[in-house]
Image (cartoon, rainbow, N blue to C red):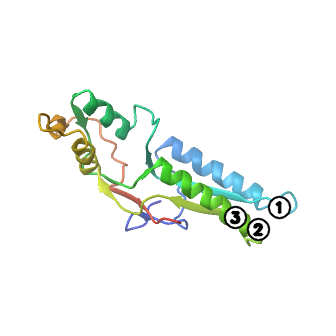
């Protein structure tokens, strides 16, 4: 569940009734793992670090994801069709996220006397940006004297388009690192 300000903290309530099935699956997986790792009899020296990744982008990203799609389209001087450009999201580069995961491992290794066997960490920037502005920032990377990639951005204004009504306006995290 998102709090009123939509800033997800590591203490934010988990909503197992989410309309998005992969979110349900992730929450159920976390709850089962937390139960397993918090069992003192079975796991005296084991700890669970659950890293909640927000909107990751970067090298070798799946071409169907927003950032990779935009780079590919602009590189090939093709239109970028944008739905829900008003939504605000918290994007984090995969290299930064990887660095934070390593920091998390070091932190837990150095604090083996943690009182809780399960720790939750947010890997995010802590800043929300509209999808529209995100795409325009990517387009600027491709602008040259002869070519303006920003002209390739087409914002879908079709009133009949399939928009997920359950998508929150803002999803932004409170960073753990």
Secondary structure under the numbered disc 1 in the rendered image: loop
Which residue is at the front of the view, 129 or 32?
129
- The residues bearing labels 3 and 2 have C-alpha atoms spaced at a distance of 6 Å
Residue at 30% of width from left, 56% of height from top? 129
Contact (Cβ within 8 Å) of mark 3 with mark 2: yes
Residue at 55% of width from left, 47% of height from top? 24
Instruction: Count the numbered circles shown.
Output: 3
Residue at 35% of width from left, 40% of height from top? 67
Residue 61, how many percent across, how many down? 45, 36
Contact (Cβ within 8 Å) of mark 2 with mark 1: yes
Residue that mark 1 sits on: 45
Secondary structure under the numbered disc 2 in the rendered image: loop
Secondary structure under the numbered disc 3 in the rendered image: helix
- The residues bearing labels 2 and 1 have C-alpha atoms spaced at a distance of 8 Å
Rendering quarter of residue 40:
bottom right
Q: Nearer the viewer, mark 1 or mark 3?
A: 3
Dot 3 alpha-carbon crowd within 10 angstroms: few under 14, some 14 to 19, many 20 or more: some
- Which circle marks residue 108 in the picture? 3
Residue 158 visible, this angle: no
Dot 1 alpha-carbon crowd within 10 angstroms: few under 14, some 14 to 19, many 20 or more: few
Dot 2 alpha-carbon crowd within 10 angstroms: few under 14, some 14 to 19, many 20 or more: few
Residue 133, how many percent across, how many down? 24, 51
Rendering quarter of residue 39:
bottom right
Residue that mark 2 sits on: 112
């Amino acid at each position: 569940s998102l709090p009123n300000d939509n800033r997800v903290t590591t203490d934010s309530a988990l909503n197992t009734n989410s309309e998005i099935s992969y979110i349900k699956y992730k929450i159920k997986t976390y709850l089962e793992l937390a139960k397993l790792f918090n069992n003192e009899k079975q796991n005296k020296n084991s700890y669970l670090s659950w890293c909640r990744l927000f909107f990751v982008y970067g090298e070798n990203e799946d071409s169907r994801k927003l950032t990779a799609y935009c780079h590919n389209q602009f590189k090939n001087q093709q239109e970028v069709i944008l739905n829900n450009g008003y939504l605000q999201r918290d994007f984090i580069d995969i290299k930064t996220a990887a660095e934070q995961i390593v920091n998390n491992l070091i932190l837990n290794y150095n604090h083996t006397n943690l009182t809780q066997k399960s720790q939750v960490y947010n890997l995010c920037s802590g800043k929300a940006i509209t999808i529209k502005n995100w795409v325009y920032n990517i387009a600027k990377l491709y602008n040259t004297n002869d070519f303006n990639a920003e002209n390739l951005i087409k914002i879908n204004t079709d009133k009949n388009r399939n928009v997920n009504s359950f998508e929150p306006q803002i999803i932004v995290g409170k960073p753990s690192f």
